Image: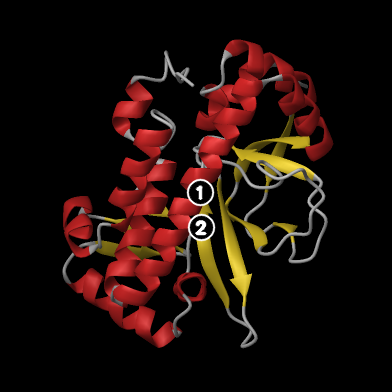
Amino acid sequence: MKSRSQGLGSNLLRALRPADLALLSPSLESVQLASRQILYQPGDDVNHVYFPCDATLLSFVVPLESGKDVEAALIGREGAVGGIVSHGRLPAYARAIVQCEGPALRMKCVELEQAKAQSLTLRQLFARYADCLMAQMFQSVACNAAHSIEQRTAKWLLATMDRTDDSAIALTQEQLSGLLGVGRSYVGRVMRSLKERRIVEFGYRRLIILDEQALRDTACDCNGLVSRHFHEVLRGVYPSAQDERNAEDPVLDI
């Protein structure tokens, strides 16, 4: 089933002008993504674009020779993965994987290219998103080099909570250590410290944030820097309480 209303779960699609959304709507299809589902591997042709909706979370991860995967970017309802800014079918460099299951909208890259060819404003909006995604990746590199494992752990948990609007995160310490690119023992020590300070609690294959402010005080400001850049370039797209209140009028001036 396809309809224009499907785009409302995606902040990025919701930011489109009505005429541009009308160009994409016939090609958008609803899909349900499963946790840990791999959308494409490095070297695969990228044939589809995925727009995560609601609380669905995707990651770009880079496989290393050691067998570890290091996360390069976390994508929620503010963005997309796939041939969103390229011309599609180019080989993927990173692995795209589902971190939090849920709904998404999908379309073929070739159909997206056809729509972009018909609309300058559509091309401009996706080019702006490409700028924001690049900024997020730059910040991730700087964060990995400059900040402690505790700061990075807190940053990742907050980024997930902000995108899902849920203080309970389906995650194991093993998964988190892989995403951060550090040993499980390091993450284990950080998580024990956060638990002892009553900032987080553990459940079965999930983590519960008890004290959001204390977690924000622990984290670096990388999430805030990325959020501010999104706000300057794509106002109203990055998930926040204020953006959700302004969701009735999301169209950007471009």
* Residue 138 position within the rendered picture, expressed as x and y whole percent measured from the top left: 44, 60
Between 230 and 216, the residue placed more toward the observer is 230
Indicate whether 175 appears above or below 47: below
Callout 1 amino acid: Leu
As helix, strand or loop, the secondary structure at mark 2 comes to: strand
Task: Specify whether 37 is left or right of 158.
Answer: right
Give the Cα distance between marks 1 and 2: 8 Å
Q: Is residue 207 visible?
A: no
Determine which quarter of the picture holds residue 187: bottom left
Circle 1 residue: 133
Estimate how packed mark 1 is, as few (under 14), some (14 to 19) or many (20 or more) residues with alpha carbons within 10 Å. many
**Which quadrant: the N terminus?**
top right
- Mark 1 or mark 2, which has the lower sequence index? 2
Task: Specify whether 21 is left or right of 15.
Answer: right
Say which mark, if any, is on residue 186.
none
* Residue 119 position within the rendered picture, expressed as x and y whole percent measured from the top left: 68, 20
Indicate whether 161 appears above or below 235: below
Residue at point 45%, 85% (across, down): 183
Task: Specify whether 14 is left or right of 113.
Answer: left
Indicate whether 250 appears above or below 160: above
Total marks in image: 2
* Residue 243 position within the rendered picture, expressed as x and y whole percent measured from the top left: 35, 27
Circle 2 residue: 73
Indicate whether 219 appears above or below 49: below
Do the numbered discs 1 and 2 sit on residues whose CB atoms are within 8 Å? yes
Residue at point 50%, 30% (across, down): 11
Residue at point 73%, 59% (across, down): 92
Callout 2 amino acid: Ala
Between 115 and 40, the residue placed more toward the observer is 115
